[in-house]
Image (spheres, rainbow, N blue to C red):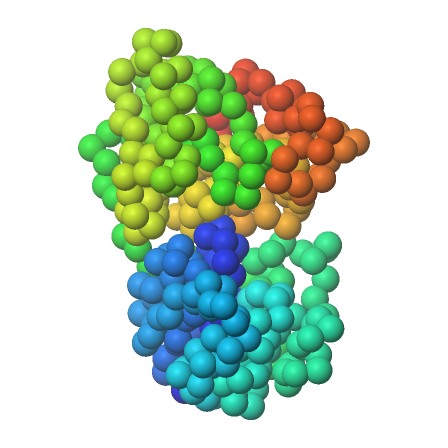
Amino acid sequence: MKILIILPNWLGDTVMATPAIELLSQHYPDAKFTFVGSYVSIEAIKYHPQCEKTVIDETKKSSSRLLATYKLARELGAFDFAITFRNQIHSTLLLKFTGSVICIAKKSWHSMFLLSHTPKISKYTQHLAQQYAQLAMINTPSWNGQTSNLKLHIDAKKFDKPTMGINGGAAYGSAKRWYPERFAQVAKEYSNKFDIVILGAPNEIDIANEIESNLKSLGVTNYINLAGKTNIKELCAYIGGCSLMLTNDSGPMHIAAAYQTPTIAIIGPTEYKQTYPWMNEKGKIVRHDLECSPCIKRECPLGHHECMKSITAYEVVEAVRELKL
């Protein structure tokens, strides 16, 4: 059986789609998956044992995205069934253009007219991992509604000593980012117990360098700064091997959940009930319930960033203590 899966664009969303992919894998154990997605999504998912082919979707770069989408679809050909985890017209068209008979997408003004299965799935009452699983299993009456843990098929790194990972970035925007000096203050409190590894994407090097500078000023020396120096596979392996992750609501937060890495997630403007660390038994969130949150904005629309600014290093230190590591 050949199954086409259009992955979400964001790394974190892709990791939250892994329970749905695992459900498909279990229900169709002989299936071969073709994954289409962004570079980061493909890099995280391509190690799945049933992956037959991966394609980085670069149709957005074309002068005519519609034509590029059509050409990509014809190159891919028809599948036994196809599913998209994106709610976007070009992903709907990509499924349609492949000529696959069974095509699944969330209900939208475009999918309901073009595809065979377009269920209405509430995003307000379910975690995103549950939404993706429900979408994947919509054509499977025997499914009992259970959604498993997040899962990545990348081996965790083995550190010589207990290690704390710090992720101070968040690709979505500055509103989701806590402050470098506060990450450093928390790390200082636990630097006798953990070595420290600072992680981040190439565009988060400045944030990581600020954390490093603050660690230096606090007299902490047992750290390494790997921001911008790891690929996606290495990032996953490092996070999987950590004894503790301090992170914003971001891709690394979900990667940590996939490995059951004990995690403190500092959350401000996001809809946390849909994106908290899914089924991470030692995942804790630290957030303040303000009138203006969740605004779900890339930057604070009111200019005060109080949802993050009001979270102190002391609160996060206490949250780590409550994990009883």
Residue at horizontal 50%, vertical 39%? 170
Residue at horizontal 69%, vertical 23%? 304
Which quarter of the figure has residue 261? Answer: top left
Residue at horizontal 32%, vertical 26%? 196
- Say which of 183 and 63 sits in front: 63
Q: Is residue 57 above or below residue 174?
A: below
Q: Is residue 118 above or below residue 276?
A: below
Q: Is residue 15 above or below residue 93?
A: above
Q: Is residue 86 above or below residue 165?
A: below
Q: Position of residue 311 (x, y in %)?
A: 61, 22
Residue at horizontal 49%, vertical 19%? 182
Q: Residue furthest front?
A: 63
Which quarter of the figure has residue 38? Answer: bottom left
- Does residue 321 appear anywhere in the picture? no
Q: Quadrant of the C terminus?
A: top left
Q: Position of residue 41 (x, y in %)?
A: 42, 58
Q: Position of residue 297 (x, y in %)?
A: 66, 41
- Say which of 230 and 283 sits in front: 230
Q: Position of residue 51 (x, y in %)?
A: 34, 72
